[in-house]
Amino acid sequence: MLKVKYAYDTHTVRKQAALAEQARLKEQAAKEQESKAKSIKNKQDNSKVNHNKSKP
């Protein structure tokens, strides 16, 4: 009985660790995507500003 309980607990801990790692990776990917989106937006905004400055 103790062996079965230990195996279950080990499986549960590993599963929780895997889920935590997946959540961490998803959060990291979301932050990277947000950073890229901000960078693209800033480039577009700067392009509009520079384009407007060149017009007389």
Image (cartoon, rainbow, N blue to C red):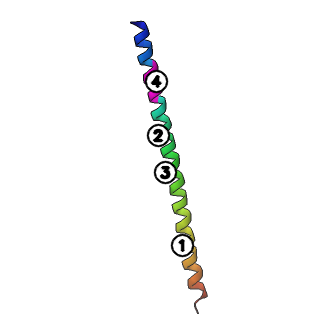
For mark 4, give the secondary structure: helix
First along the sequence among labels 4 and 2:
4
Q: Residue 44's mark?
A: 1
Residue type at tag 3: Ala
Q: Which residue is mark 2?
A: 23
Q: Alpha carbon of mark 4 to alpha carbon of mark 2: how far? A: 15 Å
For mark 3, give the secondary structure: helix
Residue 29 position within the rendered picture, expressed as x and y whole percent measured from the top left: 51, 49
Q: Alpha carbon of mark 4 to alpha carbon of mark 1: how far? A: 46 Å
Q: Residue 30's mark?
A: 3
Part of the protein shown in magenta: 10-16
Q: Are marks 3 and 4 in contact (CB under 8 Å)?
A: no
Q: Alpha carbon of mark 1 to alpha carbon of mark 3: how far? A: 21 Å
From the image, which quarter does the N terminus lie in?
top left
Crowding at mark 2 (Cα within 10 Å: few <14, some 14-19, many 20+): few
| Residue found at x 52% / y 51% | 31
Q: Alpha carbon of mark 1 to alpha carbon of mark 2: how far? A: 31 Å
For mark 1, give the secondary structure: helix
Q: Which residue is mark 4?
A: 13
Residue type at tag 1: Gln
- Above-or-below relation of 55 to 30: below
